[in-house]
Image (cartoon, grey):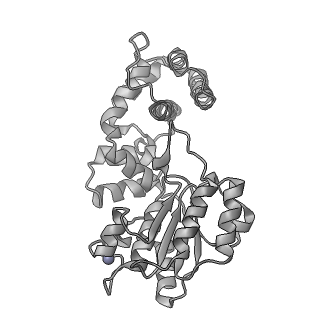
């Protein structure tokens, strides 16, 4: 991953490059902004750039250091709290043992890197204990170590940690702009680019994740499983992450109906633009009050899901509010 492959964060990348040119790199950065927006991509690129062996255009993405960082095989590159640690959809706390272990590793001299790079993803999952331990490290950071602390929920971070960091704020792109980027730079066709850009509300990281998991190919099947009231629910709607996603897809479908019904949608604002005809046909079966109620039910179901209410029950209840 090189900086030039990252879209939509030019201003922040320019700031990071300035730091690197000045040779005065802060020991800790705090990357703030909504989830799925590319904060992790920028952090990885910075870790690469700090250690890349190329003279120009760092990170090059090809030298041994860049490749090792990309594959998580660099001995001086550490990631904590990555979303991969997810278990049952619940992101576990970042525990004090993990911070202590990290502290031991970075107190040693670097094996081969110019800068030891530490990424702490989902830093809002630090426990009070581990926040205190991290704070101690940040107060006296080991030399040549750069922390990149990432969070979408800064209200949950210790103020004392925030005050030790150089803050960079990330924001989403306008969806129409992301659509163009997905077409031009990632080679997606118009329909998929449009859907991903609008469904992900301009968040590049989310759009790329859903490109990789093939959401565009599956989304109509998932939406249809709510619209065909009496058929049994498909098996894939059993895992909590998929159910959460299916609620978002359904909310998007209802929102499209709302836009069409109110006449507010220039076509371009629709998430499911590929389904324009079916939307126009479905709209006849809804009054505004039906759409309000259905959207309210989706949002309630999402809350109940997080409280571990039986998901089969939630899904079949919800279908009662969808009028084809
Ligand atoms: Zn390189």
Residue 63 image point, x, y percent: 28, 76
Q: Quarter of the image for the C terminus: give it.
A: top left
Q: Quadrant of residue 158?
A: bottom right
Is 310 on the left-hand or right-hand side of 225?
right
Residue 248 image point, x, y percent: 49, 35
Q: Quarter of the image for the N terminus: give it.
A: bottom left
Q: Residue at left 46%, top 88%?
A: 21
120 to 231, vertically: above or below: below
Instruction: Tell me, yes or no, if residue 127 can be seen here.
Output: yes
Q: Residue at left 53%, top 54%?
A: 81
Indicate which quadrant contains ligand 1. Answer: bottom left
Is 208 on the left-hand or right-hand side of 246?
left
Q: Nearer the viewer, residue 180 or 34?
A: 34
Q: Residue at left 50%, top 18%?
A: 312
Is 110 on the left-hand or right-hand side of 189?
right
Residue 150 image point, x, y percent: 56, 61
């Amino acid at each position: 991953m090189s900086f030039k492959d990252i879209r939509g964060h030019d201003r922040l990348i320019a700031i990071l490059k300035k730091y690197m040119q000045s040779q005065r790199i802060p020991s800790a950065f705090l990357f703030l902004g909504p989830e799925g927006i590319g904060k992790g991509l920028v952090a990885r690129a910075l870790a690469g750039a700090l250690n890349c062996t190329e003279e120009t255009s760092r990170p090059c993405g090809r030298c041994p250091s860049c490749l090792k960082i990309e594959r998580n095989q660099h001995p001086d590159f550490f990631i904590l709290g990555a979303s991969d640690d997810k278990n049952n959809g619940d992101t576990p706390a970042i525990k004090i043992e993990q911070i202590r272990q990290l502290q031991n590793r970075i107190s040693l001299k670097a094996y081969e890197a110019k800068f030891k790079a530490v990424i702490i993803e989902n830093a809002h999952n630090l426990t009070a204990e581990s926040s205190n331990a991290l704070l101690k490290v940040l107060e006296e950071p080991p030399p040549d170590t750069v922390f990149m602390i990432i969070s979408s929920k800064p209200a949950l971070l210790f103020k004392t940690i925030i005050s030790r960091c150089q803050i960079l704020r990330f924001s989403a792109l306008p969806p129409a702009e992301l659509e163009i980027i997905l077409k031009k730079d990632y080679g997606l066709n118009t329909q998929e680019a449009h859907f991903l850009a609008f469904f992900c509300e301009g968040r590049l990281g989310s759009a790329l994740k859903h490109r990789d998991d093939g959401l565009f190919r599956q989304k109509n099947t998932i939406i249809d499983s709510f619209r065909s009231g009496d058929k049994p629910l498909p098996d894939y709607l059993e895992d909590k992450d998929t159910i959460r996603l299916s609620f978002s897809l359904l909310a998007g479908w209802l929102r499209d109906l709302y836009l069409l019904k109110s006449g507010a949608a220039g076509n371009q604002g629709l998430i499911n633009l590929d389904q324009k005809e079916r939307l126009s046909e479905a709209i006849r079966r809804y009054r505004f009050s039906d759409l309000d109620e259905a959207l309210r039910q989706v949002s309630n179901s999402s809350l109940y899901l997080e409280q571990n209410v039986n998901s089969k029950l939630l899904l079949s209840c919800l279908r009662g509010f969808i009028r084809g």
